Amino acid sequence: MTGSEPPGSFYAGMVMRTTLAYTSARILLLVVSIILLYLIGARGLLLLALACVVSGIASFVLLSRQRDKMSGALMARIRTGQRRATGFRARLEEGARAEDED
């Protein structure tokens, strides 16, 4: 992290990277499921329904580590935002009190 980046941008970048990696893996599993089920002989709506179920189960099992990493990065980002919001509210209230005293 360099000095020219806004505060929290490191965490924002980490959240975006982990979310993009997880989402890409989910899409890849869906595409692989569609291809395999097509080769087996599923067609039409049955193909799409089975592909969603198969890829959902596969991602639940195979992508648990990436899901945990993504949720941890997201929670860290949310906590950072909450701390900043609390500090911002305190500064606003302090400014309002100073104006009231004038």
Image (spheres, rainbow, N blue to C red):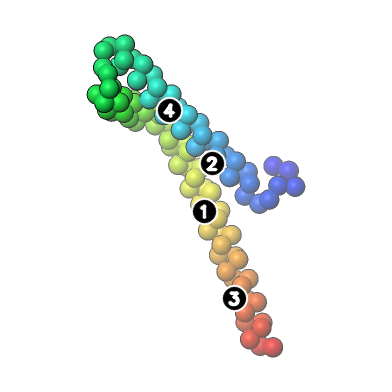
Q: Please state which of the two labelled residues, at mark 3 or mark 1, is closer to the viewer.
A: 3
Q: Earlier in the sequence, mark 2 or mark 4?
A: 2
Q: Amino acid at mark 4?
A: Ile
Q: Quarter-wise, where is residue 11 in the image?
A: top right
Q: Amino acid at mark 2?
A: Val
* Residue 67 horizontal side relative to residue 49, left or right: right
Label 2 sits on residue: 15
Q: Earlier in the sequence, mark 3 or mark 4?
A: 4
Residue furthest to the bottom: 102
Label 1 sits on residue: 79
How packed mark 1 is, by other alpha carbons closer than 10 Å (few <14, some 14-19, many 20 or more), is few
* Residue 34 horizontal side relative to residue 71, left or right: left
Local SS, label 2: helix
Local SS, label 1: helix
Q: Please state which of the two labelled residues, at mark 3 or mark 4, is closer to the viewer.
A: 4
* Disc assigned to residue 27: 4
Q: Position of residue 78 (x, y in %)?
A: 51, 52
* Disc assigned to residue 93: 3
The Cα atoms of the two marked residues, 3 and 2, are separated by 31 Å
Q: Earlier in the sequence, mark 3 or mark 2?
A: 2
Q: Earlier in the sequence, mark 1 or mark 2?
A: 2
Q: Please state which of the two labelled residues, at mark 1 or mark 2, is closer to the viewer.
A: 2
Q: Position of residue 30 (x, y in %)?
A: 38, 25
How packed mark 3 is, by other alpha carbons closer than 10 Å (few <14, some 14-19, many 20 or more), is few
How packed mark 2 is, by other alpha carbons closer than 10 Å (few <14, some 14-19, many 20 or more), is many
Q: Position of residue 46 (x, y in %)?
A: 24, 24
The Cα atoms of the two marked residues, 3 and 4, are separated by 46 Å
